[in-house]
Image (cartoon, rainbow, N blue to C red):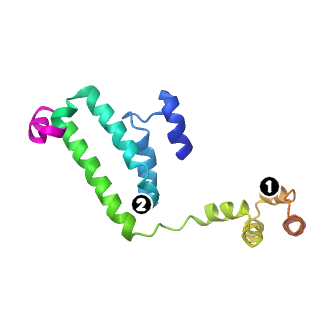
Amino acid sequence: MYKYWVDSKHNPSLESPEGFPEDYIISSYEEAEMYKELAAFYPQAYDEKMKHLAAISNVKLLKDDFAAYKKRWPQEAKDYKKFIRKWEDAKKLAKTTKPKPLDPAVQYHEWFYSDKQEEVLKALAYYHEYKVRFMLEKAMKHTDPKVAAKAEEYLINLK
């Protein structure tokens, strides 16, 4: 998702229908309850939100007299308030919430690419249990000889 964020800055066709590619990042982190990581994206999303509002409304009025802004651009005012409320909630939750654990398949995939031998071996055991042959074949090319040998052993057991 971070790569998507970066690419969208250079490729307008990757933007969301609303024009805010940041929304994808923010919603993904919120869904995963990863509020500490999310905090880094809100300032950038705020800048994008203000650029968008400046193109369709008077941002100076938004900052100086919100009530007048709300009368003239009610939907934009509502969207702005919602954005600020979500940002404030995320800041509070970043201090109190632990992220949800990763889906087991994702966790084992991360472990497969770990620098720690024991994590890679756990991933291999998972791939063996669920008969994921191509990952075991990939592990046979691992630089750690113990990992490569274990992958070969698992492949033989699958046959």
User: Total of numbered circles in the picture?
Assistant: 2
Q: Which mark is residue 35?
A: 2
* Mark 1 or 2, closer to the camera: 2
Residue at which label 1 appears:
134
Q: Nearer the viewer, residue 110 or 60?
A: 60
Q: Residue at x 87, y 64 (%)?
A: 148
Q: Position of residue 69 (x, y in %)?
A: 13, 36
Question: In terms of secondary structure, where does tag 2 sit?
Answer: helix
Q: Quadrant of the C terminus?
A: bottom right
From this view, report whether residue 125 is shown above or below residue 32. Answer: below
Residue that appears at 41% across and 55% down: 39
User: Which is nearer the N-term, disc 1 or disc 2?
Assistant: 2
Q: Position of residue 156 (x, y in %)?
A: 90, 66
> Is any part of residue 1 visible from this angle?
no
Q: Within the magenta stretch, is there residue 70? A: yes
- Marks 1 and 2 sit apart, C-alpha to C-alpha, by 35 Å
Question: Mark 1 packing: few (<14 Cα in 10 Å), some, or many (20+)?
Answer: few
**Amino acid type, label 2:** Tyr
Q: Nearer the viewer, residue 20 or 138?
A: 20
Q: Label 1 is placed on what type of residue? A: Phe
Quarter of the rendering containing residue 38 = bottom left
Q: Residues within 10 Å of mark 2 (few under 14, many from 20)?
A: many
Q: Residue at x 48, y 67 (%)?
A: 100
Whether residue 49 is situated above or below residue 156 in the rendered picture: above
Q: Where residue 12 appears, x then y in whole percent? A: 47, 28
What is the magenta range?
63-73
Give the secondary structure at mark 1: helix
Q: Position of residue 127 (x, y in %)?
A: 75, 65
Most common SS among magenta residues: helix
Please indicate whether residue 116 sits to the left or right of residue 7 in the image.
Answer: right
User: Which one is in front, 135 or 95?
Assistant: 95
